[in-house]
Structure formats: C-alpha cells, structure tokens
Amino acid sequence: MNEDKLKEILTCKSIDPAVRLDFPMLAVKSHGQPFAYLNNAATSLKPKPVLEAMARYYQEYGSSVFRGVDSIAYKATQAFEATRYKVKDFIGAKQAESIVFTSGATAGLNLVCHSFAAARLQPGDELVVGATEHHANYVPWQQLCKQKGARLVLAPNNERGEVTPELLESVMTDKTRLVAVCHMSNVMGAVNDLKALAAIAHRHGAYLVADGAQGIVHERPEVADWDVDFYAFSAHKIYGPTGVGVLYGKYDLLESMPPMIYGGEMIDVVDVADTTFRDPPYRFEGGTPPIAEVIGLGAALDYINSLGYCCMQQKTLQLCKRAVRGLQQNPNVEIYNPDNYFSGIVSFNVKGVHPHDAASIYDREGIQVRAGHHCAQPAMRWLRQNATLRASFAFYNNEEEADRLVTATKKAGDFLDVFF
Ligand code: PLP
C-alpha cells in the first residue's frame, strides 16, 4: 500500500458505531454472551439492505430472468443486469460484458483454468502460482499442469507473505504461459501489487489471473488500470450472499473461450447436430442463475458505496492493529503477520495449545475465529505450522471485541498451565 493511499485511509471519516444495527447477526448471543464475530475472512455478515433486497425479489417480482416477456419478468431481468453494471463500476472494468456471474471465486478460477488455460498450455510449458495460495487458486493449476505435462512453478513470498515484483521476476522464463496469484492472502493478509505483477507477466508473454476473494474486501480493485487478465471473487466475503461470485475477464479473452456449462440461455441456435453460443458473458451463465443472490450482491455494493470504502478500511485497520498490539503483550502468542493490519487478519498460535483447542476456548467466550489450515496447506508448509488461529476483523466489529480476543487468548494460555 503506497503512502498516499494509507494517508487517505487514516484521514477519512470514521464509521458510525450505529452501523452495527444494520447487521442482525451482531445481536445473536453465543454461550450467553454477545457474539463476537471475528471470522470475517471466511465469510462476512450481511447487512439488512442486502437481506431486504433479496426478500423483495422473492416477495414482489420473483420471476426468472431473460425468459419472460411480461413486466414482472422484465423487472427481475433489469434488477439482475443492474448488478453487472454495479460490479463493473466497483472493480474499475471497462465494460459490463466483462462481468461473468459464477457461483463464487472457486468457480471463476476453475472457469479460467478449464476454458482458457487448458486450451493454451502445452507439454513443457510453465505455469507460475504463488507459493502460499488458497487451494482454490492452487489445486486447479496443479491438476491442469499434471494433465498437460506442464511444469507448476512456485513464486516465492517475502517474509510478509507478498509475491513481490522481484520475486515473480526471478521465476519467469520464456516458457511461462500464465501467472496465478492472489490479490490478498487469506492467511498472511499480505497484499500483492497486481499492477506490477501483471506488467511482469505480460512482458514475458504470459497472462495474469488474480484471486480477488480477500483482496476486494480491503483494497478496491482497478482491474482495467492494473491490466489483469482475469479477476475472480465471491459476493459472500463483501457483505453479499453466498452462492454467487464474479469472474472478470478481458473481453477479447472471454470471447476466445468455450463455454463449460451447456444448457438454457447460453445458446444462440441449437440445430440437430450442432449449437452456436451467445457472446460473453452469457455463454458462461447456462441455466437459471442465482437471481436473488445477484440482486443481493448489487445491494451489497450499494451498501459499501453508501458507507464509503475508505471508512471501512480505516476501521478494520484500527481494530486489527489494536488486537495485534494486545496479543503481542502475551509471551505465549506467536503472530505470523504482525505488520499486515490493513487486511484485518491476525494469524497466530498460542504456544503449546492446538488451534482447535484454543478455538473452543474462544467459543465458550462467545468469540468465533477460524482454526486450521484455512484451505491453504501450501501456506501452512511455508509457515512450518500444521494449523493456525486466524482472527479477522470487519468494519462492524468494535474495540471491545478486539479486547475480548486478547483476554480470551490469555485464558487459552492459562489452559496450558492447568495441564502442564
Ligand atoms: N481465495 C481465497 C484467498 C479465499 O480466502 C477463498 C475463501 O476463503 C477463496 C479463494 C474461495 O472462495 P469461495 O469458497 O467463496 O469460492
């Protein structure tokens, strides 16, 4: 993150604490205590405007899209397509036709892998993947390389967990066809400079695919300016519903790709022996889409815009910093990413306590964190840990919740003293 951006975040207006009232889940009790939801990197909570937009669709104009000629079906189609334009503006794409609705980041990355990369990868080619990627941005490429006789090359990380331009450059060769990296790591919270990485990939004649599942939450993407070829994300991590996501692709690349799912609404003419397909993005959206969810994603983007992206970044950063500072006072705690406040993620362990045991202690305190390998076993190997704890903050968390995490961590350490 450059200095100017950081200054902008630190000086923008503060989030109104009343924002918590927008999130019904924050009123839930867990083990008789106020629920402290610190697992936002897994999935975010949903604000009322998103829930209401989805309920309105089901209650007032719950028709299928594209198929009807009546006014209610037309209204549904319009609301559905409006989200495509909202996404385009939100991520800085040039055209709405570059926005493909998928079921999530995983589906988007698999679509690029099987429809785009599979047709271009030859035996002996190289495909570069970040060394600490989530499985969704690792396993598809690994398996494709196996199928094609290509070589999977790992782009190393620096100590913060970033794939820096220098580190990417160090593994690029004239055989590299594609680079797949995350915008932000779900374990380390490290943010990659996608613009610089895309420039390197392109200089070597390769494409850049970005996994934006975490990044879109903490640094608003500028896909056209950054010149990434593909960018995938899920709605559920940015306060939208589950079951829907987006694959952004440069339009000429999407045009070159065959569909993966055949069926209704993705065809042009179906003849006895052959079929022609619609132009992107519809060619990739066969079958009845997740209509309420797409509308919910649109409402989530409206909600973010109404609060101000920058204000959300500021609050998340402050809370993460507070939790890290508190945890650093505890000699039993080992933090793996102490400087990546900006991501809202703290990855840590309590010495001698298995993360699952620690997570049970947090649970009894009404706190939910994530414990395990975080669907990123390559990252665990890199950290030389079997598992970690991960607390992840969102703008609707508060200082009290950050402090409760610190206190409960002390209890987890005391648990160790009881047994040894
Ligand atoms: N990539 C990263 C970095 C993630 O954190 C996740 C989810 O945790 C994914 C990809 C996969 O997202 P989804 O399961 O919504 O497809």
Image (cartoon, grey):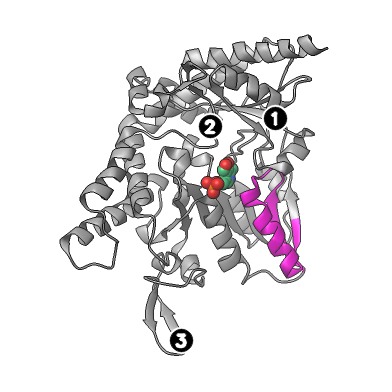
Quadrant showing the C terminus:
top right
137 left or right, relative to 295: right
Magenta range: 124-152
Viewer-proximal residue, 199 or 59?
59
Classify 298 as above or below 6: below
**Residue marked by disc 1:** 388
Residue 306 sits in quarter = top left
Q: Residue furthest left?
A: 71
Q: Secondary structure at mark 2?
A: loop
412 left or right, relative to 95: right
User: In terms of sequence position, does the residue under pointer 1 or pointer 2 come before the other?
Assistant: 2
Whole-number angstrom distance, CA of label 1 to CA of label 2 = 29 Å
Q: Secondary structure at mark 1?
A: strand
Crowding at dot 2, Cα within 10 Å, few <14 / some 14-19 / many 20+, comes out as few
Quadrant of the displayed image that contains ligand 1: top right
24 left or right, relative to 392: left
Viewer-proximal residue, 254 or 289?
289
Report the disc number at residue 274. Answer: 3
Residue at x-position 75% and y-position 71%: 123
Q: Amino acid at mark 1?
A: Thr
Quadrant showing the N terminus:
top right
Q: Amino acid at mark 2?
A: Asn
Q: Residue furthest right?
A: 420
**Residue marked by disc 2:** 2
